[in-house]
Image (cartoon, rainbow, N blue to C red):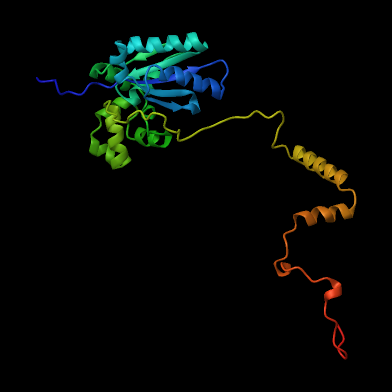
Amino acid sequence: MNTTNRPRPRAILRIHFHPAERTDELYRQLLTVVDGISSRVEPLPADWSAYVDLTGALTYWGRDVEGLVAVLRLRLLALHGVQCSAGAGPTRSIAAMAADTTPPGAATVVRDDPYEIAALLRTKPTAALPGIGPKTSRALARYGVTTVGDIADTQLPTLQRILGTGAARQAHDLAHGIDARPVVPGAAPKTMSTGHRFDRDELDPEQHHRTILRLVQELGARLRTSDEVAQALTLTRRPDPDRSQPRPPRGDRPHPRPGHHRL
């Protein structure tokens, strides 16, 4: 069989960083280390991870996937003292699933081999596949489809009746290890999240009442007279469009004609 025209298998890495303290600057520094191994890096700052396409870097560094991932992990630890967990495989979804089951300080590599891919995928719950959320997982469970292996063994027309044409095709391909989605370097994340810890209960009605009372007292201390209040309101009042033209001085105004009285 002629395999000279067969495309080279991809090597996709999903890496999770586990620092003691998270800062934006540290995340950028970690991405710089990753970029030193491969320039095809897709940041995922929401969960402090990234996708990396190692396909071309393997030839450049003259290493296999295990060796290159080991070099990357060693650099992150030596330069910044940050442990990571990594999963690598021929597709994005396989790399992500391998990384999710890997503890910090370790790496899992799934080769482009049908038996290794099936060993990783078949026992996973259906919700482990991208695009299958809790609602879809429950819909599949009603038909006895509870694992990725069940999806792979179900005929595509049957899945289409349950999930619809597009979703069924995607789930069926992913269950067989088919995932052509590329790593997009430098792509902006679709979602981001952040957190802030308050030093008190911000939803407490009494706290809101005390805050409003304090603001009113501060305002009253600053504006003690009605004249000051009127002056403050005047500074923010918009000009009257009907009085856009300046009025003439009182001495230049025409006097009423005799016999006419101003009302």
In the image, is residue 214 above or below residue 111? Answer: below
**Rendering coords of residue 209 (x, y %):** 78, 41
In this view of the protein, which residue sits in the foreground, 258 or 11?
258
Question: Please, is residue 20 above or below residue 7 in the view?
Answer: above
Q: Residue furthest front?
A: 252
One can see residue 151 in this view: no
The residue at the far left in this view is: 1
- The quarter of the picture where the N terminus appears is top left
Q: Name, please, the residue furthest toward the right.
A: 225
Q: Going 27% across and 31% down the picture, which residue do you hit?
A: 173
Left or right? Give the position of 161 relative to 257.
left
Q: Quadrant of the C terminus?
A: bottom right
Q: Position of residue 4 (x, y in %)?
A: 14, 20
Asked whether residue 184 is in view, the answer is: yes
Residue in the foreground of this view, choosing between 45 and 158: 45
Residue at image point 48% right, 18% down: 30
Q: Nearer the viewer, residue 261 or 184?
A: 261
Q: Residue 255's quadrant in the figure? A: bottom right
| Relative image position of residue 222 (x, y in whole percent) | 86, 44
Residue found 29% across the figure and 30% down from its top: 180
Query: Could you tell me residue 46's position as x and y percent?
Result: 50, 28
Q: Number of marks in the image?
A: 0
Q: For this view, does 187 lie left or right of residue 94?
A: right
Using the rendered view, name the quadrant where residue 88 is placed.
top left
